[in-house]
Amino acid sequence: MAEEVAAQGRKLEKLANYKPTRHFTPATVERKWLLVDAAGQSVGRLSSQLALLLKGKHRPEYTPHDDAGDFVVVINADKVEFRGNDKLAKKRYYKYTGYTGHLKERSGTEMLARNPEKIIQLAVSGMLPRGSRGSHMLKKLKVYGGAEHPHAAQKPEPWSPVQGH
């Protein structure tokens, strides 16, 4: 009889110390606005850091199956760099219109001159999950070629990419 009382006491003690695992949903996560200056940054290294921010992997409440990332505003996308082996001239961007023989091709130099924002968007989109979750994450990325952006009202916090990754 005494053993039963002791066993029941241990069960109650375990229940008193019980703390369930906290699961975060997109509704409970408080998103921040981050401002990233892309001037002088390498495209690939910058894009991998941006993908981590959009996924929310830098936060303690990261959940793999939910979107817990922050909004990211990238400025100076026209000053981004391609490093190594003349990559700016060798890099190719392809777009297929859907019609036979209508494969459009542009070099990195052309893309940087015509649409520098698209370079970062394409690089980051390749590092995000496929499907609706990745599309939702990509909508939180705002890229601008110059130093001005229309998101001053959100008060984005300056963020610099981690060096040495």
Image (cartoon, grey):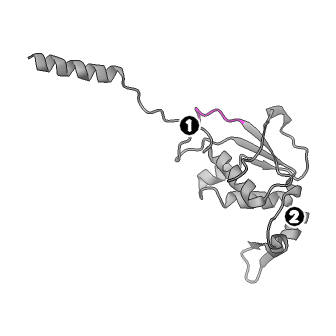
Left-right relation of 82 to 133: right
Spatial CA distance of label 1 from label 2 is 36 Å
Residue at x 77% of width, y 44% of height: 160
Look at the numbered disc 2 and give the secondary structure of its residue: helix
The answer to which image quadrant residue 9 occupies is top left
94, 112: nearer the viewer: 112
Give above or below for 80 relative to 31.
below
Predominant SS of the magenta segment: loop
Q: Residue furthest left?
A: 1
What is the quadrant of residue 89 in the picture? bottom right
Residue type at the position of mark 2: Leu
Neighbor class of circle 2 (other Cα within 10 Å; few <14, some 14-19, many 20+) is: many
Where residue 99 appears, as percent x and y from the top left, is 73, 78
The first of marks 1 and 2 along the sequence is 1
Residue 97: which disc?
none
Observer-nearest residue: 164 or 31?
A: 164
Residue type marked 1: Glu
Provide residue 45's location: percent of width, then percent of height: 73, 57
- List the residue tagged with mark 1: 61
Which segment is the magenta one? 27-32
Horizontal relation, residue 119 to residue 55: left or right: right
For label 1, the crowd category at 10 Å Cα-Cα, with few meaning under 14, some 14 to 19 and many 20 or more, is: some
Q: In which quadrant of the rendered image does the N terminus lie? A: top left
Q: Is residue 78 above or below residue 89?
A: above
Above/below status of 32 relative to 38:
above
Percent x, y of residue 109: 88, 69
Q: Position of residue 32 (x, y in %)?
A: 71, 35
Name, please, the residue furthest toward the bottom: 101
Mark 1 falls on what kind of element? loop
Task: Look at mark 2 in the image and give the residue it sits on.
Answer: 112
In-image side of 120 versus 23 (left or right): right
